[in-house]
Image (cartoon, rainbow, N blue to C red):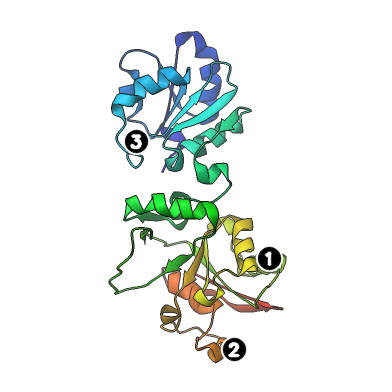
Amino acid sequence: MMTDKNIAIIAFRRDEAKAGRLQQHLDADLLFYDEGVFEKALSYSAVVAIMAVGIAVRCVAPFLRDKWSDTPLVVVDSNLTFAISLVGGHHGANELALKLGEFGLVSVITTATEAHQRPSVERITKQLGARVVNRASTKSVNLALLKDDVPVVYLSGPKIVLVDDDVSVVEKKDLRGKFIVGIGAHRNINSDKVITSIMMALESAGVSIDDVSFFATAELKKGEPGIIGAAEHFAKPLVYVSHDVINMMNPPSASKAVRLGLVGVCEPSALAVAYKKTIVLPKQIYGDVTIAIAK
């Protein structure tokens, strides 16, 4: 993951004053252009090159391998007008270009999902604190995400999973300290009601939205616009938990979902994904919405 403490800025000496302004904004190291500067800069976690795009392309080309290992590179013109995400857009360059936008530059991002304001596998994976196992799949899945929402489905093991090449398999990392918001709602619920319910539940639990890893609900809620809208509002990934996994949980509250063959929705969904399998806030009923929080 890109960190501001590991950014290199490459600039010509004539642009030292302008580079210094960006250096302060990014808390970065400033390297002056010479024959071997790109090789040195690419050892950083991200690079900002203040120069023409053509120069940057010719300098970085010999070091490019693939998008998973290339160092994110943003090119900035010498007038500090544009911040162009050139290499590694989904792996830090887009984020860096947007950060430069906070400084007044125009962020230029050309990755298709971002250009169309759609999520990407890489961004969802980052939000989940996970890693992509079958990297080649992201091309197909990102193309699908351009057209429609693609569900995130959580499976707990032990299991053997056989998938097609248009299914991205992501493996979660350590979720200790992260909260999971489980959501249940009546069909065709308004997203504003779900958003308000989540905010009320977080306040009751004393949990900040920044400490929430993602939202979870039952697979039967797949495609429910109110829940999807709430996830988009808070910029949190939404995980659909399979019914088999839900029924393996032991939620503390009774649920009308037993009529659908489930032990519950909001509580078992949160429990299924949570690291400690501990309910922080038991099921709260807000009209047609139920919320539970687990850790």
**In the image, 173: left or right of 97?**
left
Residue underneath mark 3: 70
Residue assigned mark 2: 256
Residue under label 1: 191
Quick one: 32 or 211, which is closer to the camera? 32
Is 18 in front, or is 134? Answer: 134
Disc 3 versus disc 2: distance between alpha carbons? 51 Å
The amino acid sitting under disc 2 is: Lys
Q: What type is the residue that disc 3 sits on?
A: Asp
Crowd around label 3: few <14 · some 14–19 · many ≥20 (10 Å): some
Q: Earlier in the sequence, mark 1 or mark 2?
A: 1
Nearer the observer, 162 or 19: 162
Percent from the top left, x then y, of residue 205?
A: 60, 69
* Crowd class of label 2 (few under 14; some 14 to 19; many from 20; radius 10 Å): few
> x%, y% of residue 75?
48, 25
The residue lying furthest to the top in this view is 14
Residue drawn at (65%, 67%) of the image:
226
For the N terminus, the image quarter is top left
Query: Is 223 drawn above or below residue 12 in the view shown?
Result: below
Task: Give the secondary structure at mark 1.
Answer: helix
Q: Residue at x 58, y 20 (%)?
A: 80
